[in-house]
Amino acid sequence: MDLRYLLDRPTAAERAAVDEVLGPPPSGWDGGEFTHLDGHVAHGGHEARARRHLLLPALHAVQDAVGSVSKGALGYISERLTVPPAEAYGVATFYALIDTRPRPATLLHVCDDIVCSRYGADELKQSIAAELGPSGGDESGVGWLPSPCLGQCDRAPAVMTHRAGVGYHNIAPAQPAMLSDLQVDELPAGPIHQDRSTLTLLRRIGVVDPGSLDAYRANGGYEGLTRAITLGPRGVIEAMDISGLRGRGGAAFPIGLKWRGVADADGEDKYIIANGDESEPGTFKDRILMEGDPFAIVEAMTIAGFATGATKGFVYVRGEYPVAERRLTEAVSQATQAGLLGSDVAGAGFVFDIEIRRGAGAYICGEETALFASIEGLRGEPRQKPPFPTEHGVFGKPTSVNNIETLVAALAVLDGGAEQFAAIGTERSTGPKLFCISGDVARPGLYEVPFGTTLRDLMDLAGGVRQGKAVGAVLVGGAAGSFVDPDTLDMELTFEGAAEARTGLGSGAVIVFDETTDFGSVLRRIAQFFRDESCGQCVPCRIGTVRQEEALARLAAGRPLGAVAEEMQRLDDLARVMADASICGLGQTAASAVQSAIRLGLMAGAAQ
Amino acid sequence: MTMLEEPITIVSARVDGADVELPAGSTVLEACREAGADLPTLCYGPTMTAANACRVCMVEVEGSRTLVPSCSRKLDEGMEIWTGSERAVHSRRLVMELLASASELDRAGPDLERWMGEARARPGRFGPPEPATPRVPPDPGHHHPPNTFAASVAEPPKIEDELYVRDYSRCILCYRCVDACGVEHQNTFAIAVAGRGFDARISTEFDVTLPESACVYCGNCIAVCPTGALAGRIEWDMRGQGTWDESSQEVTRTVCSYCGVGCNLDLHVQEGRIVSVTSPHDHDVTLGNLCIKGRFGWMYVDSGRGV
């Protein structure tokens, strides 16, 4: 391609960061020094373009090293990968964790989402602003930005720090005093409040060293793969069918059906993707699994590869989960060294490799087709389905995208047997399930219960409503879910029970709000979340999420446009068009929490 | 030996209760139009792969949980399609209301005006639109809190040279200019979508001006823009002065004299003066595309110095 590149040159540090990912430039045509040979031979072309999928890792490398991506750095990456600079800029400006304007060397991302707000996030922001100046500023070499949910809701309020050249760290719970000394250690994955010996999915969390393959193997690790190899690929898929295991990411698609779809799809190149881009407000289960039991994810993906014939796996880890990324990277490296990944996995004669990819601050990239685009080096925009990923997934190849918890549950199917798994829970919702309880409960955290447990029992496990208050409402399924009122606490937590209660289990987030809650402000924060996280591709979501937030703001201010009933009609119209006509699940669920709150009469000022 | 063409398979479906038959590979939109339905489209262009972004052509398909974009969904055997169902009509009206509440659409042509009229779209119901302000660099995820206006994409027009105006207050982010500049037609890649959500916009790298960018001034983005956000400078100036009058323009088809490709040119002449040059979208050489010479290389005609 005859592309025109930027004339700005990268600094030595930027160049080194990019070369760390892409290797040194092979010729003068790729941004290296021109030699006399370059006048006779041109490299690049298709070979360089085939590496477009390294665009986001290269942008990350520069952002990590210097704190932002300058014209010179973007230009150099464009040249190295033969990506038009305008497109590279389009990709860079899609992600909240990539900055295309100078930023201070230290940046604090301060969560002010619906859970952290109940734990003093606003006061935290105020004290940070008092010390560092307004958000986005750079008065002291340290800047801060408000952030959507950081997935630390079990220890709110949360802050994520980025120090150029050092790395990302989570601080939770965060207090203003801690922010003056940022030398923080890695947080442990837990705490888990339940007795581990009674648990299946969480049994190794906090008990077994997540950094040691030997410790993993001494605690039941890789027994599942051994069984899978005995069963054979078809046998594994049949076991998944018998287990009744359905996906835990929100869509509840049967895993056996998905794996069979990929196994039966035409073509040699097939992929397994572990979706660890958990970004649903109130959700942190996948973080705890990735941080606390990374080998389980590696093993489960290997089994998925064996069952489907896929030879390559990606773990797409949320950019805000630095510990999970480090642990998984280490786990992949140890498994590879032990021959449990590579060209002859466990001596069983099949090929499987895993690559870790890091998200960069975009909720939408948890949507599977947006995730493909993100891996491929494009903007993380979803596409219309069909075609479905089992036929046409990442790089256009058959792909199974599985949520992290689903993969760990698949391992449990092989460990304990499919029949035993199916015996847990109800007929249509089988197995153990993780729920992230946060908000106004005494012991927020991750809890493993059999499907069919009631919401009330789950809340009791978490110690009930904190400070002896009564329940106002519970948001089930995160920002994309629906509120249920105190009369519905006896609902069974199953896919079918949730549907009956006009909600969905979604990602397994359960956020409890006590009776004193100002639901108007909670709804505005949810509306803000969808507005900020919409990819902007389709009209119902791009503009609908903005109009929804505007209407809620007017209602909160007591200044409706026309009568209150007109505002409610507008909100209803917006909810319908977003649900009916958006491309993906983000827009389709962007009004769900708001509409449920209106139905339950939670919104003061909305009385007609 | 005679060469046999691939046999054409016929797919049958029903649109609003009427049977239609089309060749396999046809879209739902083609089926609807075959059945006589006047479905609106904005991001869809006949010479381009459907971008599937504006969602104005949505129809109800039996068995589908959500509405279906007719422009990009392939027709399946036995599909039962409803273009006039309450859901489909509601969705179309809302999409047009939302678009017109955020972007200036008075140059989007008579079709849209008719569709909006038929749908009884009232874009004003979302409040007074925000006046034009210069747009800050895209800051994905950064929140712009609502004010008393309905947020809009209004910004001052970008006039950086004698040939183009980019008046992004009229942009609906249909991706057609990006696709035309990129793989669909020109392969120049001067522009892309940057930013995210409502903050997304069409941009060069780091928003550099067009003369500084990779732009080659072929004008093929102008040729596919459905809303007048991209316009030739002369047209834009005349519209601003109120002197642009398409009904009085005479269109003369000729062949470009610059090279041997043989692109058809349509000279749009108003009061004896060429005011713009286009190429027909159905021309099998150009598909509506030209290069800088064909589209803009006629200024000498008006130089007053003779040929």
Image: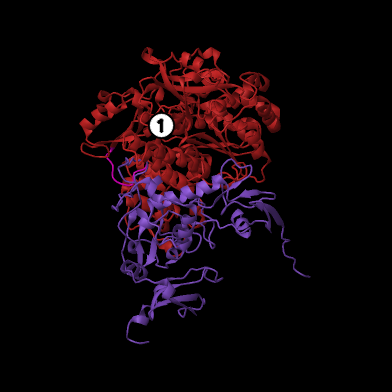
Chain colours: A red, B purple
- Which residue is painted at 69% across and 26% down in the image? A230
| Residue A537 against residue A418 in the figure, above or below | below
- Count all numbered tags in the image, as a single digit: 1
- Quadrant for residue A406, please give it: top right
| Residue B194 against residue A436 in the figure, above or below | below
- Quadrant for residue B10, please give it: bottom right
- Name the residue furthest right: B1
Q: Position of residue B180 (x, y in %)?
A: 47, 61
Whether residue B148 is in magenta: the answer is no
Question: In this figure, which residue is indicated by the disc labeled 1?
Answer: A322
- Quarter of the image with the C terminus of chain B is bottom left
Which sits in the foreground, A49 or A496?
A496
| A94 displayed left or right of B32 | left
Q: Position of residue B69 (x, y in %)?
A: 55, 50
Q: Residues within 10 Å of mark 1 (few under 14, many from 20)?
A: many
Q: Position of residue B217 (x, y in %)?
A: 39, 67
Which sits in the foreground, B194 or A160?
B194
Magenta span main SS: loop
- Quarter of the image with the N terminus of chain B is bottom right
- Which residue is painted at 27% across and 30% down in the image? A125
Q: Position of residue A544 (x, y in %)?
A: 43, 43
| Residue B179 against residue A588 in the figure, above or below | below
Q: Is residue B187 visible?
A: no
Which sits in the foreground, A519 or A465?
A519
Q: Which residues are magenta?
A: A98-105
| A285 displayed left or right of A525 | right
Mark 1: secondary structure? helix
